Image (tube, rainbow, N blue to C red):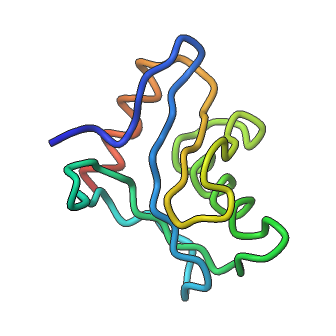
Amino acid sequence: MTRPFRPRNDGLDLFVRLTPKAAMDRLEGIEISADGRSRLKARVRAVPENGAANQALERLVAKALGVPRSAVSVVAGGSARLKTLRILGDPAVLAKSVELLSDA
């Protein structure tokens, strides 16, 4: 199984499939797409208007990984379901945290 992230010198890029307008904000583990790539599944209550769903996703991931909200940003897929989040911090610590989320 591939990992849903790519380490960087200053953190990592996390690949996410976001479902907006959900009943609750939550992370739902890893899914493997038809092309073999893995993504973290996330749901947020916010609607996909004016960046509200992206902001909710950034808050959700920051809380789950124990990093400041300012350390998480959407860098690709701003208006799509498939997104890339950049998370700043120690890449090894962040990778371990994401892997723990994946097992939940």
In the rendered structure, the answer to whether residue 15 lies left or right of residue 59 reads left
Does 63 sit above or below residue 23?
above
The x and y percentages for residue 13 are 51, 33
Q: Is residue 18 above or below residue 12?
A: below
Quadrant in which the N terminus is drawn: top left
Number of numbered callouts drawn: 0
Residue lying at the far left of the rendered structure: 1
Q: Residue at x 54, y 45 (%)?
A: 84
**Quarter containing the C terminus:** bottom left
Name the spot of residue 48 as percent of width and height, x first: 71, 76
87 versus 91 height, above or below: below
Q: Residue at x 66, y 41 (%)?
A: 75
Quick check: 8 left or right of 74? left
Camera-nearest residue between 32 and 89 = 32
Residue under the point 53% across and 66% down: 81
Q: Residue furthest top?
A: 9
Residue at image location 35% in from the left, 30% down from the top: 96
Q: Quadrant of residue 79?
A: bottom right
**Residue 11 appears at what percent x and percent y?**
55, 22
Q: Residue furthest right?
A: 50
Horizontal arrangement in the rendering, residue 67 relative to residue 69 (left or right):
left
In-image side of 76 versus 93 (left or right): right
